[in-house]
Amino acid sequence: MSLYQRGKSWYDDFLCRSERYTGCIGPVSRTVAKEILAKKQAEAVEGWYELPSKKPSPKLEEIAKEYFAYYRANRRPRSAERHETSYRAVSMTFGHARLSDITPLAIERYTRQRKEDGVSEATMNRELAFLKNLFTKAIEWGKAMENPVKRVRLYREQNARSRY
């Protein structure tokens, strides 16, 4: 059990059932911080206090519904159509997967499979851009912890015109 102060804020750090719990209590007095720490420890022992990383992440299809509602309201209709097209392709592989189960390796496998299917690199870039934007919004909304698509490199597109 540890209670310490940095600046004007109090922080707690303790173990319960071999799991580490840390957090910021805020700028309160030491006695109030001790009371809050005791309450958190009691909740952890009873199983009420959960770490943010232990909460089950939502499925991609659930987040996609919220994302498209947001996207249609804030973007042009043509952009929303393009994202819906990308979602249809991505949902065949990741539709029922939880956000925490989608890893950079899984995304690399997905792009490899799409390349074998004969999909152009520009199309795969659009699909990855859709996934990246979806994860960014999920993080902003508190539904995801990290964006695995940020660690995946996009393809170099061959979009030069042939002029005669």
Image (tube, rainbow, N blue to C red):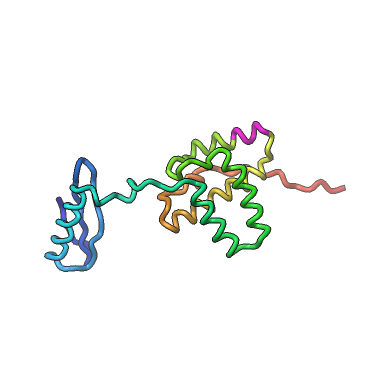
Going by the picture, which residue comes out furthest to the right? Answer: 164
Residue 47: where, in percent of width, then height?
Answer: 23, 47
Going by the picture, which residue comes out furthest to the top? Answer: 116
Q: Is residue 115 magenta?
A: yes
When asked about the image quadrant of residue 120, the answer is: top right
Residue in front for this viewpoint, 65 or 50: 65
Range shown magenta: 112-117
Residue 3: where, in percent of width, then height?
Answer: 16, 56
Q: Is residue 133 above or below residue 29?
A: above
Residue 122 as seen in the image, left or right of residue 152: right
Q: Is residue 3 above or below residue 26?
A: above
Q: Which residue corresponds to the image point at 28% horizontal and 50% vertical from the top-left?
A: 50
Residue 22: where, in percent of width, then height?
Answer: 24, 52
Residue 115: where, in percent of width, then height?
Answer: 64, 35
Q: Is residue 5 magenta?
A: no
Residue 73 as seen in the image, left or right of residue 120: left
Q: State the predominant SS element of the stretch in magenta.
A: helix
Q: Which residue corresponds to the image point at 23% horizontal and 43% vertical from the top-left?
A: 19
